[in-house]
Amino acid sequence: MIETPRRYWPVLLFLGALVAAPPPMAAAPPYTIGYLAIEDDPRHKERRSYANIVIRPAIQPFEGAKAGLRAGRIIGRSLEVEFRLTRVEGRSAGDLAAGLERLYVEAGARFFLVDAPGPVIAELARATRGRGVLLLNVSALDDALRGQDCQSHLMHLVPSRAMLNDALAQDAAPAASWCSTGRSPPTKSWPRPSSARPSAPACASSTCAGSCRPTIPDSASGTT
């Protein structure tokens, strides 16, 4: 019998462990997230005014989605999952619905970022009701998407116009009061808007789509 030198034992044990170990698991398939966009969307084009002055550069929401995907790579590595962003463009809600269906069947996509005008998103949400997908609105500010066109599988990553107007009014009301009374602004910090706003009154109308808004209190008199 040939005696194996002790210095070779660690190597033999390592090789034996490799032989006895189960085969490695197959890599998980990429986790596809769909990005549905209107082709040549005029909302995102560069805006110019008098004398051809650029008042707003071109907007590219897709670049923000790609930045978010890059930021999620660390989480993906820890979960051993590869996130993939697939873009589909179309000229109508029907085109986007067809692209969604293709990603749903071929790539198993269930989450979709939707970059389209409000009416297109509303039609797409109605067409995909009950399909087990989640639509994320990334650019439409239409109030109707949170009212009569609201769907349980439609979420919003941007505020509505009513929300923006409400925030503007809360910010402008104290300034208007100071201008009308001639008093200087208070030096202490402003209170949180939620603490100064009364609760919304109950609406008995069956046609109300959440459009009731509480009145903004007058900061000078403390009345509404």
Image: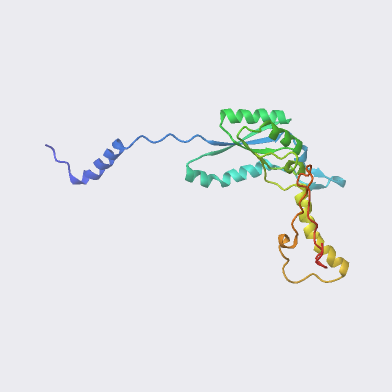
On the image, the x and y values in percent for residue 104 come to 59, 30
Q: Quadrant of residue 91?
A: top right
| Of the pair 175 and 12, the residue shown nearer to us | 175
The N terminus: image quadrant: top left
In the displayed orientation, state which residue is furthest to the left.
1
Q: Residue at x 82, y 71 (%)?
A: 184
The C terminus: image quadrant: bottom right
On the image, the x and y values in percent for residue 44 come to 75, 41
Name the side, left or right, on which 101 lies relative to 19.
right
Q: Residue at x 29, y 36 (%)?
A: 20
Residue 127 sits above or below residue 209 on the image: above
Q: Quadrant of residue 167?
A: bottom right
Is residue 142 something one can see in this rendering?
no
Is residue 121 something one can see in this rendering?
yes
Q: Quadrant of residue 96?
A: top right
On the image, the x and y values in percent for residue 55 come to 80, 48
What colouring method underlies this structural image? rainbow
In the displayed orientation, state which residue is furthest to the front.
204
Number of numbered discs on residues? 0
Name the side, left or right, on which 21 lies relative to 135.
left
On the image, the x and y values in percent for residue 148 come to 75, 40
